[in-house]
């Protein structure tokens, strides 16, 4: 007995109606879209000004505060050992200790970042860390960066 396999037809997908549909959708979106008009926005701002709806928001320069807003005060030490704390010259370790203690009293959250020159003697760096510890700053939370001049 002979059994013949019936050949199946591959389904035909009509492409032409899909192209027609896509072109109709494209034309629809182009016709219904609205573009921004900069002149219209300017006229809306002018009408708001005429109605007295202009709002002047304060800037940070206008707000006065006594609390230190930066997280870190910068202690910069040159290769010769000249120290500056937030651009204020510090002459000795005792003066540095007094300034750091007053910083700590005024703002408990104030932290110090140490920026030292690479050629700064190690003993001077250790003395500065010791002074920071005496003032109540945790050395583990004090970032220290050495500047390398090329």
Image (cartoon, rainbow, N blue to C red):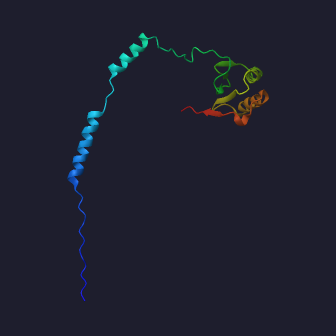
**Residue at figure coordinates x 25%, y 84% from the top left:** 3
From the top left corner, tell me how far across and down residue 101 is, in percent: 77, 23
**Residue at figure coordinates x 64%, y 32% from the top left:** 119
Q: Residue furthest left?
A: 16
From the top left corner, tell me how far across and down residue 104 is, in percent: 75, 24
Q: Is residue 20 left or right of residue 33?
A: left
Q: Residue furthest right?
A: 134
- Res. 12 image quadrant: bottom left
Q: Is residue 57 left or right of residue 124?
A: left
From the top left corner, tell me how far across and down residue 133 is, in percent: 77, 31
**Could you say which is closer to the camera, residue 126 or residue 62?**
62
Q: Quadrant of the N terminus?
A: bottom left
From this view, report whether residue 57 is shown above or below residue 36: above
**Residue at figure coordinates x 77%, y 27% from the top left:** 135
From this view, report whether residue 136 is shown above or below residue 28: above
- Res. 137 image quadrant: top right
**Could you say which is closer to the camera, residue 119 or residue 92?**
92
**Residue at figure coordinates x 26%, y 41% from the top left:** 26
- Res. 126 image quadrant: top right
Q: Is residue 9 left or right of residue 126?
A: left
**Could you say which is closer to the camera, residue 102 or residue 36?**
36
From the top left corner, tell me how far across and down residue 39 is, in percent: 32, 19
């Amino acid at each position: 007995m002979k059994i013949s396999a019936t050949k199946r037809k591959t389904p035909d997908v009509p492409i032409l109606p899909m192209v027609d549909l896509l072109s109709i959708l494209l034309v629809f979106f182009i016709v219904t879209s609205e573009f921004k008009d900069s002149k219209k926005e300017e006229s809306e701002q002018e009408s708001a000004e005429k109605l007295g709806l202009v709002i002047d928001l304060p800037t940070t320069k206008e707000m006065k505060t006594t609390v230190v807003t930066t997280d870190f005060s910068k202690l910069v030490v040159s290769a010769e050992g000249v120290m500056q704390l937030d651009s204020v010259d510090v002459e000795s370790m005792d003066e540095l200790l007094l300034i750091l203690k007053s910083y700590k009293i005024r703002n408990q959250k104030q932290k110090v970042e140490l920026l030292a020159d690479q050629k700064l003697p190690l003993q001077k760096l250790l003395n500065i860390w010791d002074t920071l510890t005496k003032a109540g700053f945790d050395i583990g939370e004090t970032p220290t960066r050495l500047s390398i001049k090329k």
